[in-house]
Image (tube, grey):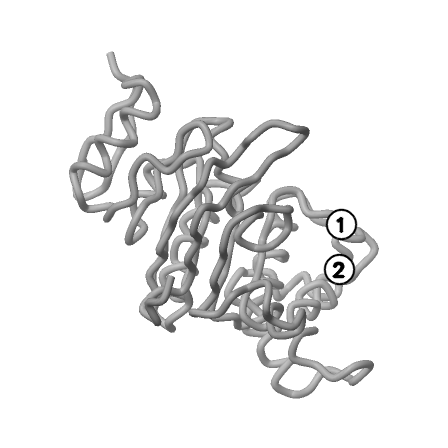
Amino acid sequence: MNAPMPWALQTRGLQVQLGGRAVLHGVDLDIASGEWTCVVGPNGAGKSTLLKAVAGLLPAQGQVRWQGQERDAMQRRERARLLSWLGQGEAVSLDLRVYDVAMLGRLPHQDWLAAPSAQDQAMVKAALQATQAWDWRERSLGELSGGERQRVLLARAMAGNAPLMLMDEPMANLDPPHQVDWLEQVQCLRAQGTTVLSVLHEIGMALQADSLVVMREGRVVHHGAASDAATRQAIEDVFAQRIRILAVDGQWVVLPRA
């Protein structure tokens, strides 16, 4: 693991045990800077566990590097500035205003007990507008639907302006139009140089990424460009050939295999 950039995230021999059971088995990854990489695979493959281990949210063995630096050697504040996290079903006080939830993403950039700066306020406004949540800024989180809350939590992650962003099932509770909005937001993040690593169940959406990590039973069985036929074959294989991936009008469509 001596290579400098272009790797934004690297793991070597990453292992996780939960409840005495091995969930990840020595995962090695090199995630390119400024690209969107999507992790896919069947239920129980270890996708969410992988993201949490990379983020430092689970105890794990092995090496993890962010932006060429050993993650565990960084100060907590430095880590918070480098990486934003959006997880599944995050516990957030439903009494908080939407604006205040989004402002939480700016905490790593603020001095202790300091009032939000003009830049903090501008970043929060931009993030809420990007996720189409600005009009709710004075409402409490408890007044929103599940999909609306998810958009606010995405705004919180975006407001941090971190160079690395990890998202675990970010489309949970989003209806199709807002799934498309999320895809556009990821493309904008990528255009500004942000590295995005996400877990998705929506294979058709995942194939819009630059590259895919295909997992099965706690192991990476393939890591390649979304445009490669070998990547699509690997996806079909881990789903036991129960699906087929076809190009329709320039888009990838996932259908059950007859």
* Residue furthest top in the image: 258
* Residue 96 or residue 44, whichever sits in front: 44
Q: Tags 1 and 2 in contact by the CB under 8 Å rule?
A: yes
Q: In what element is the residue under mark 1?
A: helix
Residue 110 image point, x, y percent:
70, 81
- Image side of residue 98 versus residue 250, left or right: right
Kind of residue at disc 1:
Glu
Residue 205 image point, x, y percent:
35, 43
Which residue does the numbered mark 2 point to in the structure image?
Answer: 139
- Residue 154 sits above or below residue 109 on the image: above
What residue is shown at x 63% (from left), y 46% (from top)? 58
Toward which corner of the image does residue 23 lie, by quadrant?
Answer: top right
Kind of residue at disc 2:
Arg
- Residue 123 sits above or below residue 188 on the image: below
Toward which corner of the image does residue 31 lie, by quadrant?
Answer: bottom left
What residue is shown at x 45% (from left), y 53% (from top)? 182
